[in-house]
Amino acid sequence: MTMVYEDRGDEAEAAVPVRRIRFTVNGEKKIAEVEPRLLLAHLIRQGLGLTGTHMGCDTTNCGACTVLVDGVAVKSCTMLAVQVDGHELSTVEGLATASELHPLQEGFKEEHGLQCGFCTPGMMMAAKALLDANPDPSEEDVRWALSGNLCRCTGYQNIVKSVLWAAEKLRTSAGE
Ligand code: FES
Ligand code: FES
């Protein structure tokens, strides 16, 4: 993988400390050489080119940068890239298969859960962590799980409906 460094002006390249990390992203094994202070969000977007992970605030408020690390929803602007060494990373690009949308993606489409779409990848990843842990969530469960994700467009009602739609689809597919 291409090495990713923060630009520190005219400091000598040799002075930039680098750490090698190994991790999986959406099931693919990767090795990266990163500056220890590099944010996970920057590794994902600039290093891996997975620009579905958005950055809205850079300060742990908006949730647009939410990804899963070992299945747990985290805000990738608040984690260092070196912290995923040895771990499994999942981003929104890993939701769909080559031929099918993930039920969460279908749900957002069916229930009009997005307008500009900026918050949507983070909403979906936070929702995925919820549905993996709780396949039959209440509306309150969904609202709680998404409470760290902000949307400036939808008013949340349709986002909640989208996640409940996906939960039902997943349960039906599982034969419940
Ligand atoms: Fe990470 Fe807003 S960019 S929480
Ligand atoms: Fe625009 Fe959520 S759909 S910010």
Image (cartoon, rainbow, N blue to C red):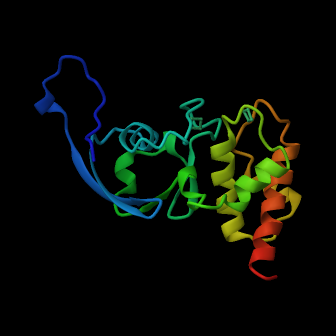
Tell me which residue sits at (71%, 53%) in the image.
Answer: 105
Tell me which residue sits at (69%, 44%) in the image.
Answer: 148
Pick the residue in front: 100 or 158: 100
Q: Position of residue 123 (x, y in %)?
A: 69, 47
Tell me which residue sits at (81%, 75%) in the image.
Answer: 172
Q: Position of residue 106 (x, y in %)?
A: 75, 55
Tell me which residue sits at (46%, 40%) in the image.
Answer: 41
Query: From what the image shows, is residue 57 above or below residue 173?
Result: above
> Number of numbered discs present?
0
Q: Position of residue 86 (x, y in %)?
A: 35, 63
User: Left of 18 or right of it: where is 90?
Assistant: right
Q: Quadrant of residue 43?
A: top left
Among all residues in the image, which is located at the extreme top? 10
Query: From what the image shows, is residue 13 above or below residue 51?
Result: above
Is any part of residue 34 visible from this angle?
yes
Q: Position of residue 42 (x, y in %)?
A: 42, 37
User: Left of 148 or right of it: where is 89?
Assistant: left
